[in-house]
Image (cartoon, rainbow, N blue to C red):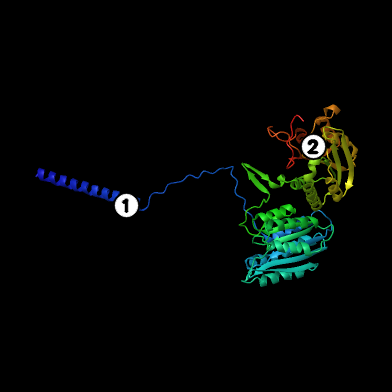
Amino acid sequence: MIFAKHVFVCRRDQKHWICCLLVVGLLVCTLQASAQVRPPRRKHRIMVDPGAKKEKTLKADVGASLKDIAKRATQHTQNPKIDVVFVVDGSRQMLGHLAALEKKFVDMLTVIEAKTMDYRFALVSFHSVYGEPRVNFHQWTFDYLSIENAFRDMRVESGNNTESGYGLDALIKGLNDLEFREEVITQFVVITNSRMRTSWTEAKAKSKINQQIIDLCRKNAVQLNFIGISEKVQAELTDETNGVWYPIDSNQRQMDGQRIRSGATIADKALLRIDGLFKRIAENLVERNPGKVDIVFVFDYSLSMEPKTDAACEGLDLMVSVFKAAGLDYQFGIIRFWAAVGGGESTIVVTKPPLEPEQIKSLFRLPKIGDEHLLDAIIEGVPRLRTEPERELVLIIVTDESTSKRSEKGYTAGRAISVCRGAFARVYVIGGVTSMRSSSIGDNFQRQVAQLTKGEHYIMPGSTIADEGR
């Protein structure tokens, strides 16, 4: 009886273990099946660089862009005269932007009327129909309502058959057909969401028409502003005419236009051109917010400068454009210097301010055969300027060669720097090069005088590499 009971208990335990094993087996199979269907998620660690900067996104706002253009045009003058020319792409792709322009035009008008009632508007619209270019021209008007109505007409007419036209040709037409007022910096506002094109078919047509546009802008004191897309042409035209580029939509990347990358260094393409250096100096001067300023060029008059004079004259035009836009009270003067070949006696001609820009350009264009002695020009020429006490003195040294040593006359770099500081002059240098083997390729005196007088130093594009022992 006891044996039978023991057998019964053993069988019951055996069944219990079998059930447990079956349950465990089912669980294992279920887990394996789940693993095959949906693998477990792994937690990924995201490494965040706290010093990393977020990429800048551009905010596109036609009204804000128009207001900014108006503020720049009116910020420096009391009761100014304001001339604005709209050059507008009237294609069907522009329908939404045309509606925004029509609505936001009043934003620009409000800023202008807060400063003056002497303003004019003109309009050049462009598009193409079945490949044929069309340009509509609205001459100067003091009636802003007529321009507003023209915007509305453009929007209504932008049907399915209107495509983007030739914006560069439209710019040329506006610059050639409009009459410009003297002493007025005219603001051109180009509005397009397409690339700027030309119908010209000759070789390098785009480059040629761009240069013609730049020349006409400089001649007529025109600043080109774009509310447009990220393309090289738009960036270069704004940069060369002292205008500003704005994005027409937020998909555009920031346009630097004149920026280039060389290895790990980002530089400004303008610094590779003489005219770009003149403009950069002008912008730096304006940023320092001087009161009244006498700007005197210390100009190397030797023959090696002859190929660079045209670029210097173009740079002077850019400089004047920057000064006028900023409302700067400036006067020009010049110190020319040259010497006979082989270290002869220096000739230094000082022409005090005020000189007109055209007079300065005519003096740039007459270099002499011979050598040059920059230290002589500084030590002997600067004291003869005798500028008025209330006017700040700015010297701009322009030479393509390194500074020759004049120890026989007791003329040293230190003495020349003392003369500049004694005259309370700020010195900018577009200068020569010593040796490419040197750790610094800038002329020591030229770099030091700019640094110690809180100016700036640049290497002259195409300057001569001279012996440091010269």
Q: Residue type at mark 1: give it.
A: Ala
| Helix, strand or loop for disc 2 | loop
Q: Is residue 265 above or below residue 239?
A: above
* Near-viewer residue (143 or 314): 314
Residue 453, which numbered label?
2
Q: Residue at x 14, y 47 (%)?
A: 8
Going by the image, does 159 lie left or right of 15?
A: right
Real-space Cα separation, disc 1 to disc 2, in angstroms: 80 Å
Is residue 33 shown above or below 422? Answer: below
Q: Which mark is residue 33?
A: 1
Q: Is residue 169 visible?
A: yes
Q: Nearer the viewer, mark 1 or mark 2?
A: 2
425 shown above or below 39:
above
| Nearer to the camera, 113 or 381 | 381
In front of the other: 462 or 396? 462
Of pointers 1 and 2, the one earlier in the residue sequence: 1
Q: Quadrant of the C terminus?
A: top right
> Where is 311 relative to 223, above or below?
above
Q: Is the N terminus in the top left, top right, bottom left or bottom right quadrant? A: top left
Considering every residue shown, the one lying at the far left of the view is: 1
Q: Position of residue 75 (x, y in %)?
A: 79, 54
Q: Secondary structure at mark 1?
A: helix
**Mark 1 Cα shell of 10 Å, populated few (<14), some (14-19), many (≥20):** few
The percent position of residue 428, horizontal first and vertical second, equals 79, 40
Instruction: Report the disc number at residue 378.
Output: none
